[in-house]
Amino acid sequence: MECVALTGISRQVIRELLANGIRTLEIRSPNNFIALLQSGPGDVIFLTEASGPDVVTGTGGMLARIREIQMVTHKVVQAGADFYEEREAQASRVQLAMVGHGRVRGAKGFKLGSPTVLEVDAVCYYDAG
C-alpha cells in the first residue's frame, strides 16, 4: 500500500501507540508537518524512528490510521527591560489509531518540501505458543 510517512518518531511514542492502540502526537518537524498537510482523517500512515534519508527497503515501523488532525499556533513571548519580542510557531496535533506493523517495500518520493511517500507492506506476526 502507498503511505505517507512520519519519520524520526521516538521509540517511546511507537511503544505507547502499540500498547494503548491510540496516541496523540504534536508534530513540529517541517517534513512531518508537510506530510500531515497532505493527509486527512481515515488515511493510513507509516511511522518509523528512522530519519527520512535513512528510510530504505526493509525499514520497519507502525501503520496507523489518522483519527483527527488539528493545526495549532503557539505564541512565544520574550520580554526584558528594554525589549518585547513575540514569535509564532506552527504545529500539528494528530490522533492516531494503531493498524499494525509495516515494512517498507520501496520509496516513491523524498523531495524537499513534499511528504515522504512509501510503498509499505503490512507485516503479520503470529504466536505459535
Image (cartoon, rainbow, N blue to C red):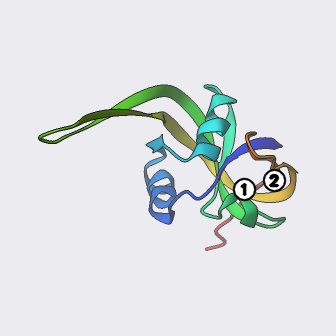
Mark 1 crowdedness (10 Å alpha carbons): few <14, some 14-19, many ≥20: many
Q: CA distance from mark 2 to mark 1?
A: 6 Å
Q: Amino acid at mark 1?
A: Gly
Picture residue at 80% right of the left edge, 58% below the top = 104
Q: Which residue is mark 1?
A: 102
Say which of 28 and 10 sits in front: 28
Q: Is residue 25 above or below residue 94?
A: below
Q: Is residue 102 left or right of residue 106?
A: left
Is there any visible trace of residue 23 in the rendered image?
A: no
Q: Is residue 63 above or below residue 95?
A: below
Residue 79 image position (x, y, % from top left): 19, 39
Mark 2 crowdedness (10 Å alpha carbons): few <14, some 14-19, many ≥20: some
At mark 2, the secondary structure is strand
Q: Is residue 87 left or right of residue 53?
A: left
Q: Which residue is mark 2?
A: 121
Q: Amino acid at mark 2?
A: Asp
The numbered mark, 2 or 1, whose residue comes first in the sequence reads: 1
Quadrant containing the C terminus is bottom right
Label 1 near label 2: C-beta < 8 Å?
yes
At mark 1, the secondary structure is strand
> Residue 16: which numbered mark, if any?
none
Q: Quadrant of residue 115?
A: top right
Quadrant containing the N terminus is top right
Residue 60 image position (x, y, % from top left): 70, 64
